[in-house]
Image: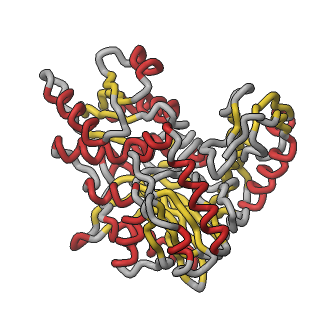
Amino acid sequence: MIRMLLLLPGESYRVTDFVNAASRLAGELEVDLVVGSDAADALAGLYPGRFLPLDFSDPERAARRIAAFADSAPGRDLDRVVAVDDGGTLVAAHAAERLGLPANPVGAVAATRDKALLRERLAAAGVPSPPWWRLGEDDDPATLGRQIGFPCVVKPLSLSGSRGVIRADGPGAFTAAVERVRRLLRRPEVVRECGGSADLLVEGYIPGREIAIEGLLEPGAAGTTRLRVLAIFDKPDPLDGPYFEETIYVTPSRLPAREQQRAIAITERASHALGLRRGPVHAELRLNDGDAWPVDIAARSIGGLCARSLRFASHRPGSDEAGASLEELLLRDAVGGPAATAGYERESSAAGVMMIPIPSAGILRSVSGAAAAESVPGITGLSLTVTRGRRLVPLPEGGEYLGFLFSRAATPEGAESALRRAHAALRFEVEPDEAGVG
């Protein structure tokens, strides 16, 4: 019996999907599940005696608590610590190091959570990288603005989902962008999320199409890293700024095979340069000047509910014909490594997901057109994740979507078209917020 600690940040979209996957596989994989989370009110009652309250904002303290839990009584030894989202990756790395469990090194995971450190390591390894600068919280942006080229992109060091990311096309816009991101980082809830760091990354803007690669890493020969690609997503909507709100992901990619192979090779090199060796990786890359330029590398799988767009069929005798979810694949990999996921391939049909963008700041009063959206041929699901009466905050300050649309079709074009038609059927009534946003 393998005892697994599953780290579930309370604000993660993916709590339900991972819990369902773990429950489905518990008997087959002989897994005894323990849940660690900062959402004690929601989860403690579901796992009596197998719930561990944790503070994800202090990874080392959380790791000490996990180690103490594992040592507190016979039978509480932990065999795996699995993070499901950004919030738990560093906690899992620290805990695995303390307990001597297989995992990525703490330093490697830390580099994926600090954009300046990520840039430093990628550039040092010769991975295609734009020029970049670290701007301290007390540094004068006007001074740096006289030294850099434009356009450039301003980013917080550790926020995800394009939150706080702004393109600036000149010195005045650059200073304004820096001040805007600094205001965001002074918000109490963001201070806690970022660990108090208000430093910024400034990097040269890379034009071009953007894609995402979903994969699993495994140690290769002579200390190298091998990448098993699970899916390559096209992002058909342009991401030119000034903000970078992602909307549609579609797989399989329509890129020429040569460009796909180059992007895969760069992702593998980037993962090795960061020190990542095993487990899930989610990479976002820009295609420009005949090369692939990493925008971000994360030591976790795709965020939000986007994983629901992926299903994996197994060629093994007696396997589930309905296919496995990405979460099931990740848990199999955590328990048994590459051998446990061998034979699983993404289903043959094209699939897509739309992260429904927030149309404007204010209070969400009503949503209509859901039935019409769900009736569009090719649409397989609609999940509205923001409730009526909720205050909406768009990017770059906001960090959520209105929900997710899912599609399947014979071709990527069909999957994309279904998402656009379904989104056009939805209507969101937003009452302007007198308190203001930003």
On screen, residue 156 versus residue 210, left or right, reads: left
> Where is residue 68 shown, x and y percent of the image?
17, 29
For this view, does 252 lie left or right of residue 51? Answer: right
Kindly indicate the quadrant of the structure image that contains residue 269. Answer: bottom left
Q: What residue is shown at x 42% (from left), y 34% (from top)?
A: 8
Q: Is residue 416 left or right of residue 105?
A: right
- The structure residue drawn at horizontal position 44% and vertical position 75%, both measured from the top left corner, is 265
Residue 385 in sight in this render: yes
Identify the residue at the far bottom of this view. 289
Depth check, front residue: 117 or 126: 117
Task: Measuring from the top left, give residue 49's x and y in whole percent.
Answer: 29, 16
Q: Quadrant of residue 26?
A: top left
In front: 124, or 211?
124
Comparing 353 with 67, the one in front is: 67
219 or 397, which lies in front?
397
Residue 324, position as x, y percentages in the image:
51, 42
Find residue 123 and report its horizontal and vertical position in percent.
39, 77
User: What's the residue at 63%, 74% (across, down)?
Assistant: 171
- Residue found 53% across the figure and 76% down from its top: 292
Using the rendered image of the protein, determine whether residue 312 is visible from the camera's viewpoint.
Answer: no
